[in-house]
Every structure is written in structure tokens, then in C-alpha cells.
Amino acid sequence: MFKSTDCKALANFCNNHPDVLECYRVAGEISYIVKLATHSVESLEQFIDESMQYGTPSTNIVLSSNEKKIIAPFISEE
């Protein structure tokens, strides 16, 4: 999560970073949620250090998941 000081630059940084899986611009106290997968804690630390020029990062680590997939009905435009 980021409180970004330069949203366009952060989005560009995330789009070009190989560890970033998803990047969402959101409304509220934070401006971005970034999902990434790294090889190590050291590479996570490097990502955080490199991204700090675009704002203040806050890191959460997923320990486990009980993901449920919700399938929305498709509505035809016809």
C-alpha cells in the first residue's frame, strides 16, 4: 500500500517492475495497492527502498489464503 506523492510515476514504476503482479489506484487514505511476488525478503526490501521516492509504502505479508472465487453473471449488451 502506498500514500503516493507522485501517482503517475508510481504507476509507471510498478508497470515496469518484474515483481509487481497487480497495481490498483484506490480512493481513501492510501492511493495505491500493489501486489507483488518476490524471491526473498531481501528483494522485497529492495522494492520498498526503490519505491520510497514515489511515496510512503506500507507492507503487509499474506501468510495464508482461503480465497473464494466469485463469478459474476455475464450480462449481454444485446
Image (cartoon, rainbow, N blue to C red):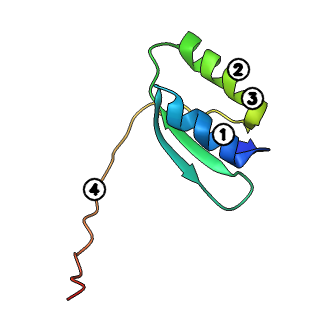
User: Comparing marks 2 and 1, which lies closer to the viewer?
Assistant: 1
Q: Tell me if residue 33 comes above or below residue 43 in the rendering.
A: below
Q: Are marks 2 and 1 in contact (CB under 8 Å)?
A: no
Q: Are marks 2 and 3 in contact (CB under 8 Å)?
A: yes
- Mark linked to residue 69: 4
Left or right of 63, for residue 4: right
Q: Tell me residue 58's x, y (percent).
A: 69, 36
From the top left corner, tell me how far across and down residue 6 is, in percent: 76, 44
The image quarter containing residue 75 is: bottom left
- Identify which amino acid the numbered label 3 is placed on: Met
Q: Identify the residue position indicated by label 3 in the image.
A: 52
- Which of the labelled discs sits on residue 49, or is there none? 2
**Which amino acid, by three-letter code, is at mark 1?**
Leu
Circle 3/circle 4 CB separation < 8 Å? no
Question: Which residue in the structure is indicated by mark 1?
Answer: 10
- Crowding around mark 4 (Cα neighbors within 10 Å: few <14, some 14 to 19, many 20+) is few
Q: Residue at x 40, y 34 (%)?
A: 64
**What separation in Å lies between label 1 and label 4 (alpha carbons)?**
29 Å
Q: Marks 3/4: CA distance?
A: 33 Å
Viewer-closest of 7 and 68: 7
Q: Amino acid at mark 4?
A: Lys
- Residue drawn at (37%, 40%), measured in percent from left and top? 65
Name the residue rendered at 58%, 46% in the picture.
Answer: 33
Label 2 to label 4, Cα distance in Å? 33 Å
Viewer-nearest of discs 3 and 4:
3
Q: Earlier in the sequence, mark 1 or mark 4?
A: 1
Nearer to me, 29 or 75: 75
Which tag, 2 or 1, sits closer to the chain's start?
1
9 vs 17: above or below: below
Picture residue at 22% right of the left edge, 75% below the top:
74
Q: Secondary structure at mark 3?
A: helix
